Image (cartoon, grey):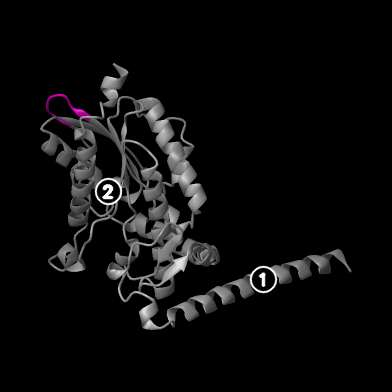
Amino acid sequence: MDPADNRQAHVALIILVIFITAASVAALVLIWERRPSGAKCLQVQECPVPQTGTAILEGSTVLPATVTAILLYCARPLLRLHFAHYKRDVRQALFPEDDPHFDIPGPNPDRLLFIGDVAVAGYGVLRYGMTASSQTAQFVAQDRGRGCMWATIAATDLTAARVAKMPTLDAAEVDAAVIMLGVPDVLLATSSTSWAVNLMTIVEHIREQAGPNCRIVFAGIPPMADFRPIPALARTMMMLQIQRINRVTQSTASQLTNTSFVPFPEWRVGEMYVQELFSWKSLHEMWARVLASATVQLMNDSNMPSSNSNQA
């Protein structure tokens, strides 16, 4: 057989395998969805928390990890298409244009580090003081009754892999780090294994610089598919990936000391509107309150000396 014909045959075979795999997965999901109603939960909220290795689809279907992985692998082109839409949306979006401030006066200031994508960058708000990171620092200072200083590492396309490869995170003397990554990783279909390895590497790098007692707060990925109209199939794939990554993050947090995982708080669309316009400021504030609460809880634990005192 001619080498060119041989290559064409291999390409055709690969395409056929991909098509059969996708069709098989679609059939499996369809069969699962048509199970008797008593065999699956009616609403996500009423479902028991699935064990590690499962994912809950919107509509409450519980999928095994293997099926989830195959679905997301096949959905990579679709998710990357929405990543292109996301980058276009970010270029047109509102971001703070004022001069940022990274300190709140007060005695014995806590030192925080925020690492994240659009939330830390300030998507949708006019001033840096409205961002989730700045408001988290403000709430921490208020709750702790002391000053606060913080730094940010932010980019709208920042992934966990990029942060893990950074030569330094400027985390010296940091008391707590809040990690708010995930949106680009959802749209790039980052695997569970890569995500877990990158998170562990990030924590290791932070604690190498800040000290082993530095508190780590992992922020769960928000339901980004709820923030703008998205076709049903893409929405389902995004939610699957969000659930998968959040479960890995939660599992990673449980393996580390002085670490917590904070899921995105429950929210209702109606509460996020001001004069018929979606209020990103309100969303940033709501997110900041739960992040600050988790951060303060870790820092107030008397059994956890600060990173500064550890280095003294």
* Crowding near the residue tagged with mark 1, few <14, some 14–19, many ≥20 C-alpha atoms within 10 Å: few
* Magenta stretch in the rendered image: 104-110
In the picture of the structure, the residue carrying the numbered disc 1 is 17
Asked if the magenta segment contains residue 107, the reply would be yes
Asked if the magenta segment contains residue 78, the reply would be no
Residue located at (19% from left, 34% from top): 300
Seen as rendered, the residue at the extreme top is 312
Residue 122: give its label. 2
Image quadrant where residue 55 sits? bottom left
SS at mark 2 in the image: loop
Seen as rendered, the residue at the extreme right is 1
Residue 71 point in image, percent of width and height: 51, 67
Between the residue at mark 1 and the residue at mark 2, the CA separation in whole angstroms equals 43 Å
User: Which is closer to the viewer, label 1 or label 2?
Assistant: 1
Quadrant into which the C terminus falls? top left
Q: Type of residue at label 2?
A: Gly
Q: Is residue 192 visible?
A: yes
